[in-house]
Image (cartoon, rainbow, N blue to C red):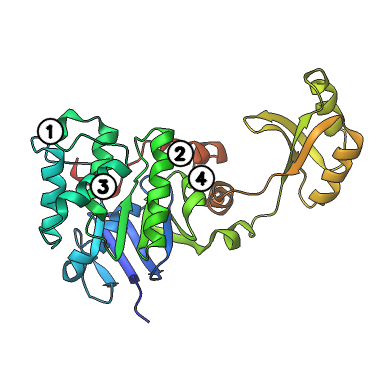
Amino acid sequence: MTKAIEMRGVRKTFGKKVAVEGLDLEVELGGLTGLIGPNGAGKTTSIRMVMAILFPDKGELSILGKKSAVESKDQIGYLPEERGVYKKMKVGAFIKHMARLKGLPFDGIGRKVGEWLERVDLPGVADKKCEELSKGMQQKVQFIASVIHEPKLLILDEPFSGLDPVNMRLLRELIKEQQEHGTTVIFSTHVMFQAEQVCDKVVMIHQGHKVLDDSIDAIKARVPTRSVLFDPLTPNDTHAAASAVSSIGGVDRVDRTDRGHEAHLMDGVDAAEVLRRIASEAPVARVELRRPTLEDVFVDIVAGGSGDLSEEQLRAQLREGGKSVEVEEEVSA
């Protein structure tokens, strides 16, 4: 059966720097796959090779059964990491122009443009110049341009970057809708909770190498539960609850986090038994196992081989994007 994307042993270098090494990747038709990892991991380089913007030094690619995305260009929608619209063009004219480039018939384009602008909460902007819109609004216009021709394959590079929470939620809904309508979707992100919210499958990349490729549930199952979340019965019980939980066997320490109080467990202890004891012995209103996140899994896999980066630095890089950039951008700077 034809795959949406196939990559075999793909390697890409920029001078002496290796951006992607030995990458094997399969994206099933109709799937929603997240390509995740910190900035500089090789995600954008991989996507640019898929889009035939860059060419691999070694290896083979197949896009929608063709040897190059160029052969399937009208069936692909692409939102690049570098945002860009024709600033002097009016919004409606810009989207129509991009639709025509993708082979969409002229008849009905205006109606579709209007419907999409309504869908992304941009009614009445068709006659405004693109430069008059905020960056977030321009980003939504670019998203429309990437999907208006109803592509079979939709590729989004850091699509949530720069969006506020409301528009992040809207974009997640739109991405899911595309998949439900039969479009194969792959998007890259360094913020892993975003992938958790929408993806069926994720591919983790670190320093140009694929380190995991599986469904989200299967990946999370690889890391055991190592902490328990709890809330004191009342604000007056905060100290007593933390003290009581700290004294329970198997608890290493208790921290206050943005999720509440978190009891970190010693290696090898039965998390369910610790949870039962907290519920029965401490003044708590809520207690639950903290399930591992994709961030936990990634850090667990790469922390041992990440040189001078501590676990805290790795997590900060994943949440904030870090200071690294894709290799080709660094070389060309």
Location of residue 322 in the rendering, given as x and y in whole percent from the top left corner: 41, 37
Residue type at tag 4: Phe
Judged by depth in the image, the label closer to the viewer, 2 or 3, is 3
Location of residue 179 in the rendering, given as x and y in whole percent from the top left corner: 40, 60
Give the quarter of the image for residue 170.
top left
Residue located beneath label 3 in the image: 115
- For label 2, the crowd category at 10 Å Cα-Cα, with few meaning under 14, some 14 to 19 and many 20 or more, is some
Residue located beneath label 2 in the image: 317
Judged by depth in the image, the label closer to the viewer, 1 or 4, is 1
Label 1 secondary element: loop
Residue located beneath label 1 in the image: 129
Disc on the earlier residue, 4 or 3: 3
Residue type at tag 2: Gln
Disc on the earlier residue, 1 or 4: 1
Residue located beneath label 4 in the image: 193
Disc on the earlier residue, 2 or 4: 4
Disc on the earlier residue, 1 or 2: 1
Question: At 47% from the left edge and 52% from the top edge, which residue is drawn?
Answer: 198
Q: Are marks 1 and 2 in contact (CB under 8 Å)?
A: no
